[in-house]
Image (cartoon, rainbow, N blue to C red):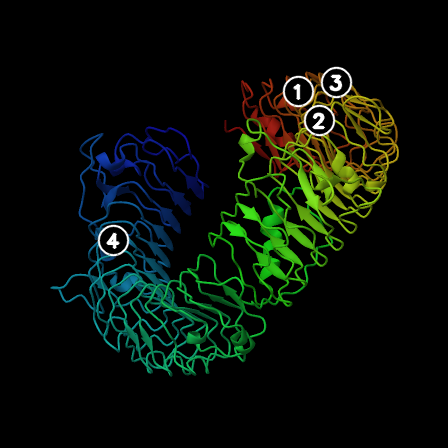
Amino acid sequence: MDNTIGKIGKGAFKKLPNLTQLFLSNNRLDNGNQLILNFGSHDQLQVLVMNNANRFRSYSRSSIQIFGEYPNLEILSLRENYAVDLEFAQETSFREYYFTYTTPMTPSQNWMPFPKLKILDLSENSITRTNFVQLLSNSLYFLDLHDNSLSELNLNEKGNKLFTLNLDKNKFNNIQQYNDGYNNGLSMADLKNLHYLSVSRNEINTIESDAFQNNNELLFLNLSSNRIRHLHPKTFANLQYLKTLDLSNNQLEVLRISINETEISTLYINNNNIKNITSDTFMHMPKLIKLLMGKNKIDKIDVNTFAHLTTLEKLDLSSNMLSSLPEGWAESLVSLKYLDLYNNEFTSLESLSLTNTLPLITVYLMKNSLEYLNVKYFENLPQNLTIDLKLTIAKIAFTTTFFCWSTLCTTANDVYFTTENYMDESLQPLCNDNISLNFSNAVISEIKRDFISSPVITCLNLTGNSIEKIGRGAFDRLPNLTQLFLSNNKLSSVSELLNFGGHDKLQVLIMNDASRYDYSQCYTYYTDNIQIFGKYPNLEILSLSKNCFKDLAFVQENPYMESHFTYMTSQNWMPFPKLKILDLSENIIATTNFVQLLSNSLYFLDLHGNWLNKLNLNEKGNKLFALNLDKNKFYNIQQQYGYGETLSMAGLKNLHYLSVSRNEINTIESDAFQNNNELLFLNLSSNRIRHLHPKTFANLQYLETLDLSINQLENVPHISNETKINILYVNNNNIKKIISYTFMHMPKLMKLFMGKNKIDKIDVNAFAHLTVLEELDLSSNMLSSLPEGWAESLVSLKYLDLYNNEFTSLESLSLTNTLPLITVYLMKNSLEYLNVKYFENLPQNLTIDLIN
């Protein structure tokens, strides 16, 4: 598989009498698809997969010839070989190299090459003929013929046990029960056990009324993307167990199905030409759960259209021509949760005729020309409803009062350490818990003072507009606002990003990428500090990522001063006294005045992707749980704050997660982490660390993950006290030798990564005490042998990666059959030979991966 095999000789696999599975896909057999099975029969083979095995692709379209018999073959896949058919060929005794090609033999003539075949995949070929049917067994269970050129098919008795049939992307234009010899098409005769049938993307324009008369076991029927204009009312009458029917992307103008009561739970009739839905349309489908009728020409729905649909949960009427729904139309829809009215012609919510007894969760109203929203009408809507107005063309006077119920924002107990984009993606849905008026992507350019007024709105989403300016006091008339989303806008002044002033009730404020400057432009355009006007006494989450600012500064308006502003210190002003989560990542912060504005309750701080070279949080970090400082400019880490480019760890006694990757760290003081003994995760990767003092991590008794990869270490760091480290990364360094007892104080190690170093020698006791180690990576080093007994302590080792070393034989690995190894990776080693006898000394269930 995935080689460049050009030819397989006759009898190639006869010396493997117990071979049961053979995979030959993605090769380049150069003798055409006629001879891709040239190797002949096999008595024990059960699985044969030869997908995309023909070199010539479309240049060699012919039948695949079957040589010999496969009495036990159950699975055969010959996908994507540009075959036009299968033929059974018999070798002639008169010529050494040539064959005579017989017409396919029938079972009665004793030619049945695959008597036990259950699964056959001939998809993505060029099959036009059906001689292959005569070669099939009567036990066939699954047949995939999608993406061929078939226009007729009659399986006869070969389809008696067929469970699944895929005929997508062929050229059928007719489906009937029996082949009458004139209108050749798809014959459904004898497919009495068929449960799944797909004939999508064909050219079907006619389905006989009795086509599915004997196929009453069908559960799934896909007739989408054809040319069906008309269906006889009795076409599906006998399909009493049918659950999914797909008639989408056809040319139906009317849907009338005269059917005994069915089990259909999902019906697709979207993308047709249906204009009117009458009262009796769905009367025989009482178990419908999903009904999709989008992209038709429906302009009218009768009041009783959905009578009896008491289990319907999802109704899609999008992209039609509806301007109103009749009073009482939804009375029977007692389970309806999702109603999609996207891209219709509704002008008001009243025209939907909804009531507060419906269990609706979401109504999609995007792309409707809503002219007004009547505040009083919200009282008639379901309490837990979200009305999605994204991209709605709405004429709204912003002095109107809006209602938007939402539950209070609560933050999860578990804070993920990797936070890029998480603020927008994970917190915005909180705006949709209950009724939410969502202005995201509504193309608003300016928000003036008091643009919305309501005492009940708790959540406002203005994400993804082109807002250039927000006036002072813009949200003052929303006294109970708790969540505000303003990301992805184009505010013209970075310094006035928070110009709208403080807010007493606000708990969540997300303004990522809200300025007109792209992050890549931060280096070329003049940027400034974000000025904070007013206080946010209840703010718990603040995210200001990707805004090209240098720092935060708190200012107070002073009408008696010429500049109108006075810069305040934290001695008198604490704008965010309850702040727990702060994201200032991907800006150009180089100074740390913002620290004075932080609360003592800060739990999570993300500063990755800035220009910081010094930081001292002092008492502001007493409760800090997670700190991300990746991609900054720190040179030194120490306990107390000093001079130069220093990260001070003082005060961070509760810190559990710290990442200072991709900085310029070359020095870590021996007592740097002396008072940070709660650390679980420490990432110091991608720096310039050459040496670490043995006591550097001595106090980190709970540390579980330590990442020192991509540095300049010449030895594995020695740790003086026993730790709980279970994952250690020291890959991509300059380590040359692993000495005895290197890891003696890390007995809990489960994963050890030492790839891409310069290791050429490992002492016999290097891994002593590592009894729980499961994964060991020594790839891309300079090892040519491992000492006898080196793995005696590794009683849990499952994966050993020796990729890209200098081993020449398996013996040089010094492995024994007592190891629980599952896989050894030996790609890119110059193995000169494989000693068969040595395999007896290897673990019984071991896989040795040699594929480059």
- Dot placed on the residue nearer the N-terminal end, 3 or 2: 3
Q: Which residue is mark 3?
A: 690
Q: Give the percent coordinates (x, y) of residue 97.
A: 22, 30
- Residue 491's disc is none
- Dot placed on the residue nearer the N-terminal end, 1 or 3: 3
Give the secondary structure at mark 2: loop
The 10 Å Cα crowd at callout 4, few under 14, some 14 to 19, many 20 or more, is many
The residues tagged by marks 4 and 1 sit, at their Cα atoms, a distance apart of 55 Å
Callouts 4 and 3 close, C-beta under 8 Å? no
- Dot placed on the residue nearer the N-terminal end, 2 or 4: 4
Q: Give the percent coordinates (x, y) of residue 430.
A: 62, 59
- Dot placed on the residue nearer the N-terminal end, 4 or 1: 4
Q: Amino acid at mark 1?
A: Asn
Q: Which residue is mark 1?
A: 757
Callouts 1 and 2 close, C-beta under 8 Å? yes
Looking at the rendering, in which quadrant would you find the N terminus? top left
Q: Amino acid at mark 2?
A: Val
The 10 Å Cα crowd at callout 2, few under 14, some 14 to 19, many 20 or more, is many
The residue depicted at 28 percent of the width and 41 percent of the height is 67
Q: Amino acid at mark 3?
A: Arg
Viewer-side residue, 318 vs 91: 318
The residues tagged by marks 3 and 2 sit, at their Cα atoms, a distance apart of 12 Å
Above or below for 437 versus 101: below
Marks 1, 3: nearer the viewer: 3
Above or below for 117 versus 519: below
Above or below for 70 versus 406: above
